[in-house]
Image (tube, rainbow, N blue to C red):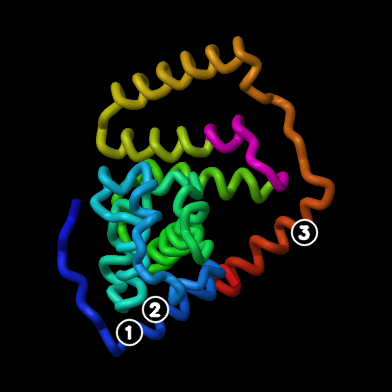
Amino acid sequence: MSTKTLNYDTTNAKSLLREVSERSSQNLSACYQCRRCAAGCPVGEETGVTPDRLIRMVVLGDREEALNNLLVWQCVACYTCGTRCPNNIQTARITETLKQMSKEAHLDPLRPRVADFHSSFMAAAEHVGRFNEIEGMGLYEAKTAIKELKKGDLQAVIDEMMGQAKLGMKMMKKKRMHFKVDKVKNVAEVKALYRKAKQGKGA
């Protein structure tokens, strides 16, 4: 587990705290570092950053560390942290906000494949109001294949496609592969939310 000292940036602390709190709709100031979230985080040990420490980075105004840590990209949104938190702070919403802020700042993602899956998921969900496996995974595989081809690694593309094909067959046998496109009743409302998020940076 990382033990790097966090530095208090008086100039940027309030602005970063305000931005993340507003965009995530979470009251980060209510965190008093009881670390109950840290005890239940399934990826904290692997990422070297636990939810309480991530919140502390934001509170102290350490924008660079807050936007560049593995927890932002590897949070599995299990909501264990929020369930254990006495003040109901959902760190998954904070990591999602920081992920968006990182993309807006054009920072290289620490986990490129996670970033590709995230953008593919959001693009697919925007079209019909919910995630469609065929479209979402198609977009994801296209993104990863293009990157591998640019590196000249054709074998990696073939291996990935073969692996996904085998997984798809297993899912079909268990009736977990959905070819039907299910739309929400009012897709226009979903699209309007997407536009509002893009215009207001998540507002």
Image check: 3 left or right of 120?
Answer: left
Report the magenta residues as a range: 128-138
Q: Position of residue 48 (x, y in %)?
A: 24, 51
Q: What residue occupies the far top of the structure in this picture?
A: 173
Q: Earlier in the sequence, mark 3 or mark 1?
A: 1
Q: Position of residue 65 (x, y in %)?
A: 26, 66
The amino acid beneath tag 1 is: Asn
The label number, if any, that marks residue 189 in the structure image: 3
Q: Are marks 1 and 2 in contact (CB under 8 Å)?
A: yes
Position of the C terminus, as image quadrant, is bottom right
| Residue found at x 27% / y 69% | 64
Q: SS for tag 2?
A: helix
Q: Which residue is mark 1?
A: 12
Q: Judge by depth and name the residue closer to the eye, 39 or 68.
A: 39
Image check: 192 left or right of 31?
Answer: right
The amino acid beneath tag 3 is: Glu
When the figure is inspected, residue 45 is found, relative to residue 142, above or below; the finding is: below
Q: CA distance from mark 2 to mark 3?
A: 30 Å
When the figure is inspected, residue 193 is found, relative to residue 63, above or below; the finding is: above
Q: How many numbered discs, if any?
A: 3
Q: Residues within 10 Å of mark 1 (few under 14, many from 20)?
A: some
Q: SS for tag 1?
A: loop
Q: Which residue is mark 2?
A: 16
Q: Position of residue 60 (x, y in %)?
A: 30, 77
Q: Main secondary structure of the magenta part?
A: helix
The amino acid beneath tag 2 is: Leu
